[in-house]
Image (cartoon, grey):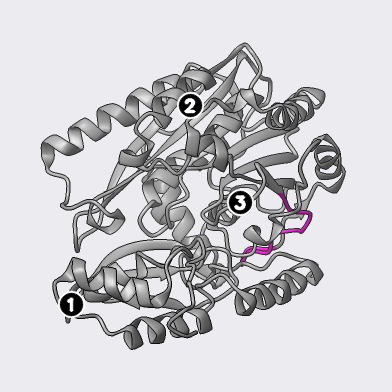
Amino acid sequence: MDVRSRPLLRPVESIVVPDKRHGRVLVLRDTQGITEAQAVVPPPLVPVVARFGGRLSCEEIAREASQELGVPVPVEIVVRLADELERGLFLEGDVFREARARVQQEFAQVEVRPAAHAGGAYHGERGALEAYLQDRCLAQANGSDAAATTNGGRMVALVAPHIDPWRGAVGYGHAYRALAASLPPEADTFVLFGTSHAPMRQPFALCRKPFATPLGTVDADLASIDALAARAEGFDPYADQINHKREHSLEFQVVFLKHVLKNRPARIVPILAGLGAQQASGEDPVGDARVVRFVDGVRELVESRPGRVVVVAGADLAHVGPRFGDERAFGAEDREHLERADRASLEHATSLDARGFWSHVSHDLEQRRVCGLAPIWSLLRTISSGVRGRLLHYEQTVDREDGSIVSHAAVGFYAAEPAIGVGISARAGSRSTR
């Protein structure tokens, strides 16, 4: 880098977190898995990084940042910061492209998708994980039994949280206890729609790899995946496969599924839903023939195997507060307003109103930052008529340090007709003696 270089920050996750020295700092994180590093940017340098858009030279950035801050920002500081971010793989350019190609090749060659968040976002040891999922999650979900949620119906689809299981324990419990109580005995395939927290070039991304968990590996349904790939007309469904490497929205669902199912044979169809162009424009995805053709393929898969295929969306709702860029934490009135907005969105979902759900969420997407828009919409497009939705649980998880909020919900979708022999024991993942 030199004073004439025009640094371009690549799309990464940015959050604001408390810091003892600076009060608050900006943290940049790579959700794609190209680098494990995080970049911590103190407040005086945020106006500099904010201008790393590829348009301005380091010299011009220094000049503009100096005017904004009211104090001189030496160009050497800008160049040094750009160098550090480039080495950390946070800038677009040759260094990043070489690293991405290497990581993509490595991921393509592994036979099983590793449990990337085991030992961090959840227990990495089997016995401890089984005990936590059963005793802290499923057992705490009071009321999520077959009688309360299904009236004898069978579950055909589920919206579950994808917040980490430490904070989302009760929400996950409601989702997966309901699934355990209402799952048809013949169900053997789970189509998983997840949020991609890393940007995607294409509307959807498939993965043909089995998923490893501390509870055992869950196989991929290769025949179904290949059939969906063939439906992906006009886009490459594997162009963004690298996003599966560290994406937690699907990994957490696989962990809970494995716990509930234990040794029962089951396969997954992992799909990351991007729909980035539609989310940016607010336009309903039905206007994109590529999107419609793909989700129609999922719907046909579900309808071709009655009772055997269950669709799951790993999807959180709002992200608000200082951590996500808001000036202050939400007070009681703000939280009530947020809950009303979330519940209104969920009413569209439980009514199987995909168009209304997309419209309601997209109109204030920049304010609520609902990250589950794409997977929930995709799930709604796969559900056949005669299915009813039920909100099982709604929750706002509040950060203890700065009051930021992530809201999430558990929503079950049930076939109208009662099923014979429905359900598996909610104690299927009983505490291990190990």
Magenta residue span: 206-216
**Residue depicted at x 45% and y 68%:** 29
The residue where tag 2 is placed is 358
Query: Is residue 174 or residue 96 the one in the foreground?
Result: 96
Q: Quadrant of the C terminus?
A: bottom right
Residue 76 image point, x, y percent: 35, 88
* 429 w.r.t. 410: above or below: below
Distance of label 1 from label 2 (alpha carbons): 39 Å
Give yes or no for residue 308 being in the magenta stretch.
Answer: no
Q: Earlier in the sequence, mark 1 or mark 2?
A: 1
How crowded pointer 1 is (Cα within 10 Å; few <14, some 14-19, many 20+) is rated as few
Give yes or no for residue 211 being in the magenta stretch.
Answer: yes
Overall secondary structure of the magenta section: loop
Q: Label 3 amino acid? A: Met
**Residue depicted at x 41% and y 30%:** 361
**Residue depicted at x 80% and y 38%:** 228
The residue where tag 1 is placed is 22
Query: Is residue 379 or residue 4 the one in the foreground?
Result: 4
Residue 223 image point, x, y percent: 87, 43
The residue where tag 3 is placed is 200
Residue 304 image point, x, y percent: 82, 24
Residue 25 sits in quarter: bottom left
Distance of label 2 from label 3 (alpha carbons): 19 Å
Residue 182 sits in quarter: top right
* 239 w.r.t. 357: above or below: below
Provide the secondary structure element on which disc 1 rests. Answer: loop
